[in-house]
Image (cartoon, coloured by chain):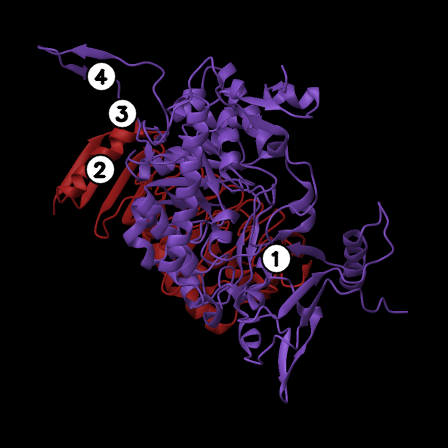
Chain colours: A purple, B red
Amino acid sequence: MSIGSTPLRFRVTIDPDRCMNCGRCIENCSYGVYRKEGDSIRINSRNCVACHRCLAFCPRDAIEIEEKPGDYRSHPVWTREIREAVFNQAKTGRIISGGMGNALPWPIIFDRLVLDACQVTNPSIDPLREPMELRTYIGKKPSSLSIRERPGKDVELLTKLTPNLQIETPIMIGHMSYGAISLPAQQAMARAVHRIGTFMGTGEGGLHQSLYPYQKNMIVQVASGRFGVDIDYLERGAAIEIKIGQGAKPGIGGHLPGEKVCADVACTRMIPEGSDAISPAPHHDIYSIEDLKQLVHGLKEATEWKKPVFVKIAAVHNTAAIAAGIARSGADAVVIDGFRGGTGSAPVVFRDHVGIPIEAAVASVDAKLRSQGIRNEVSIIASGGIRQSADVAKIICLGADAVYIGTSALVAMGCRVCGTCNRGMCAWGIATQKPELTKRLDPETNAVQVENLIHGWTLELGELMGAAGINSIESLRGNRDRLRGYMLDEGLLNVLDVKTVGA
Amino acid sequence: MKTLTIDAKDIHYTPLNQQIRAAIADGAKEITLNNVLGQRFIGDGLRGDDVTITVNGVPGGDLGMFMSGPTLIVHGNADHAPGNTMDKGRVIIHGSAGDAVAHSMRGGRVYVRDNIGYRGGIHMKKYLEKRPILVVGGSARAFLGESMAGGLVIVLGLGGVPPIAEQGVGSGIHGGEIFVRGPVDNLCLGNGTKQAPVTEEERAMIRPIIEDFAQSFGIDSTPLLAAEYTRIAAVSARPFANKYTLE
């Protein structure tokens, strides 16, 4: 007996009283939900992924999308998702792949942390009236300074400083490669970070020629496939990031399927058109911390010690010890990608089950580095699951220097978090290489949206700091006294080094 | 021709590379490094198509890493990963080299007169006219050409050593080709590989490369050109094509 059909995930309906038969839904849906038959629009709800492209462009609000219109018998153990995964694998015998980030309802630590504010005994600061220092420097800081007095009142700095990145807000955009996302999406974000005075990552897909004007705001990535990496690429970036792991799929490599390797992606990655781009799980020249040091130094030597080198790891059980190793490798920043980090495509079993939350990872890394007296050796960049300015403030209190956002920047460009980035059919033109879809993005319009988002968060961050009587991001960093845990267990409070509410 | 000799004794790799860069900027075409002893990253990220650097001694790891143009001639052995992510140019080693030789190399040539360690030619890749070539005179250890995405590896087995005697050759290969002088035991082949005797066309393709290799080391190429070769390549260019199902 075959398994047969499973219940619809979404049911799409068009209100006939409102529909004017304009056909915009047919044009906009890249998943084939709508078709014209005679004078009427027919619907195949089974193809719907709830990306809302049709809904967003329906001029009459005639479309309704209902999630799980018909469900299974409810069961707390055998959830719908579990049952459908079994059906899927019973039919195919394959690994299930999905897009976006972790889709399991794990508790969110951010939402169990509250921020502090001044009352009576210490005055809060009005950011409208007084300057709020949000400028952040990413990179090594000297453990001490050696100064010589010059004749007169001037002094000379004898300590040789290491190059740092100067960012005007502690919010950067993480690495989403050309291939995983479209070129207009990268172009929009590049314009945004350029105007704001922050940075974005290239991902492991090389740097497209059209992004060269923004290269001073780009962090170029070197991952295990070494795609798009040559000396020109390394010299173009403001910083270089070695990608060891990704929060959405710790411990495994990446495979960009040949379908997504169009001529332009091929050129940027420097691989033949239509070929699979396979990034191995490890870097095959890095099997130890000593080998990592070798690559960090190799990259610095190639670029004549002018650029900071970051190392990105997925947040896993022993992240603190690993980060301590990275801090001794000569790297200038460690990027920690939590288990909620997004992806263009990952095995669902990894996306949902492997790794730890960014909040615990950052707190433990910060504590470990401080306990070893090497916190100044690296900046900490938190990535994976940063959804709002409150998350930025909280993770900085837990010890981060800055954050990478990913999904939120895509949402700013229209993404509805439908989670089908892996299918390459993104109706919003973001996670696709199909020219008829990518042209839906306008780099300028979308740049403004991304810029607005980061600007709004930056304003909120200033307000939160002012309310807490803090006027510099330096005073917020690692300032756990500004956090309290609400309904967190004692073990986790200890890891976060945060007191409970009321204490 | 502007030439320069640098005594590398007790010099750290950064000032050594700085001296090389300064010499090239100053128009030097032939640079000789004497007393090299373990300095890593020699020629790292270096440009200069008409520059030849002779290394007398034993360089450290990642020789010619990210290099784009120059020729490096080593009179001695090399450590791990010479030609790592190299883009253009040549690395000619009169001796043996360590693990991961030509790692992720994307263009140019690496010639090793004697033997190489594990994972030689790993993840080499090709794009348009950029086609990396690794030729090994002696033997290669396990996992030669692992994850190879493009390019060419040739192992000659000179000096009475078997060119390949260990497992995992071409494991995960999805592009490029490996030529081995003589027959190859199937037990040595990694997952997803297949072997076949060379065709006349392939023989003609590798001929000038073998001649060039032999000439570089003053070896008689006649027996090498007359020998039989085995070609190892990927069963599929899409090894992951049937691995996934959509959520």
Pointer 1 chain = A
- Packing grade of label 4 (10 A; few <14, some 14-19, many >=20) is few
- Residue B45 visible somewhere in the drawing: yes
Three-letter amino acid code of the residue under disc 4:
Leu
Q: Does label 1 lie on the same chain as label 3?
A: no
Looking at the image, residue A129 sits to the left or right of residue A370; the answer is left
Q: Which residue bears the numbered disc 1?
A: A418
- Residue B81 visible somewhere in the drawing: no
- Packing grade of label 3 (10 A; few <14, some 14-19, many >=20) is few
Three-letter amino acid code of the residue under disc 3:
Lys
> Residue extending furthest left?
A151
Residue A34, picture quadrant? bottom right
Q: Which residue bears the numbered disc 2?
A: B20
- Residue under the image location 62 percent in, 51 percent down: A346
In three-dimensional space, the C-alpha distance between marks 4 and 3, rounded to whole angstroms, equals 28 Å
Q: In this view, does B225 lie above or below B124?
A: below
